[in-house]
Image (cartoon, rainbow, N blue to C red):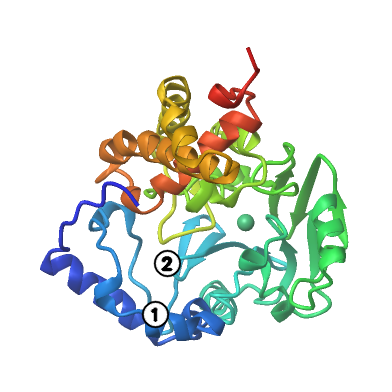
Amino acid sequence: MTASSGRQPDATSRRRFLAAAGAAAAVPAAAALIGGPLAGNARAAAAGDLPDYAPIPPGALGPALNADGYFAGNIHGNLYWVTDSVYQAMFLSTRNGVVLVDAPPTIGHNLLRAIADVTRVNGRPAKVTHLVYSHSHADHIGASALLGADVVRIGHSECRRLLLREADPNRPAPTVTFDDHYVLETGGERLLLDYHGPNHTPDNIFIYAPDHQTLMVVDVIFPGWVPFKNLAVSQDIPSWIRAQDVAMGYPWQTLVGGHLGRLGRRADGNLQIAYVADLLAGARATIASLDPTPFFARYGNNSWAIFKAYLDAAAAQVAAPVTAKYLGRLAAADVFTADNAYVMFESLRVDYGTLGPFGNHP
Ligand SMILES: [Zn+2]
């Protein structure tokens, strides 16, 4: 870890955190997040062993959660979103029923409660008729089975292939698939589903609600925050970087990013693009300037040790100025920038072909 500010959160942010933690503790979502086999380790870790991080800028946080641990809000017209402050889903309330996009298991049954909140007021049917999968990852669609057997599941053809392979009963494969574009129209509402190639996963799609100027694309843009570890654990880094620009190419005013507690604005997309561009520029500068000689001298015939020490040093060199530049502008810049820098540096080598000291023999 680099460039942790070492600052203690002030009293206000400490109270805010405790309030959020208290709300989270009240719901099964929290159990899903911190439960499982790692829960014992989490309990075992003494608080004093854990690093300090800078406070989260208030603008990165979303609306307060209710007593059940979720917030359901209107985006525009009949389009709504729901969050547990870590994950997000989106739904359209149509005359025929509900079109839901994603079913994150941390939100789980609160998806149905959020839908009931809305349809109780507007008098429209609460039954979920269609479930769109943004991509195949279990953390975004692992509550799919809650919607029952007769909901129409829609996803990219690659999503179907991956889910048939996984055979996870919590994530039934989509039965309606498409390769390039799909228009979902029902009950007076429509969504445009577009595939622009692999990025975060091979099957990640763009879901656009043209009547509401809202784009949902998951694990690509993280409004108010730096991208999750390792550039969102993306499988194709250059295409993930391009996917940010593809997203900005839609005329949206609201972005549902699938993560964290608030919606995105166009400025959020531009800020993340600048952050990622700074990482790439820093990686290029570092590979041109970081002398590998000390690593060869120190580790001799241990090739992996040479690589590890060199790549770790490179990531730290890339991350330091980027962390300093974005701390206070993007939440958790001090948490994940070193990991993001590492993956960017490695992508520069293996994807972009800039091999630096490990390139062509003279
Ligand atoms: Zn994902």
As rendered, which of 140 and 359 lies closer to the eye? 359
* Disc 1 to disc 2: CB gap under 8 Å: yes
The residue lying at 52 percent from left, 75 percent from top is 114
Picture coordinates of residue 34 (x, y %)?
47, 79
Q: Dot 2: what SS?
A: loop
Q: Would you say 348 lies left or right of 62 here?
A: right
Picture coordinates of residue 292 (x, y %)?
46, 29
Three-letter amino acid code of the residue under disc 2? Ser
Picture coordinates of residue 293 (x, y %)?
45, 27
Q: From this viewpoint, is residue 197 visible?
A: yes
Return the mark for residue 85: 2
The residue lying at 26 percent from left, 47 percent from top is 3
Q: Marks 1 and 2, Cα distance to the nearest angstrom?
A: 9 Å
Q: Would you say 311 lies left or right of 175 here?
A: left
The residue lying at 79 percent from left, 78 percent from top is 169
Quadrant that contains the C terminus? top right
Residue 100's place in the image compared with 316, above or below, is below
Residue 232's place in the image compared with 282, above or below, is below
Residue position for label 1: 24
Residue 173's place in the image compared with 299, above or below, is below
As rendered, which of 54 and 117 lies closer to the eye? 54
As rendered, which of 154 and 199 lies closer to the eye? 199
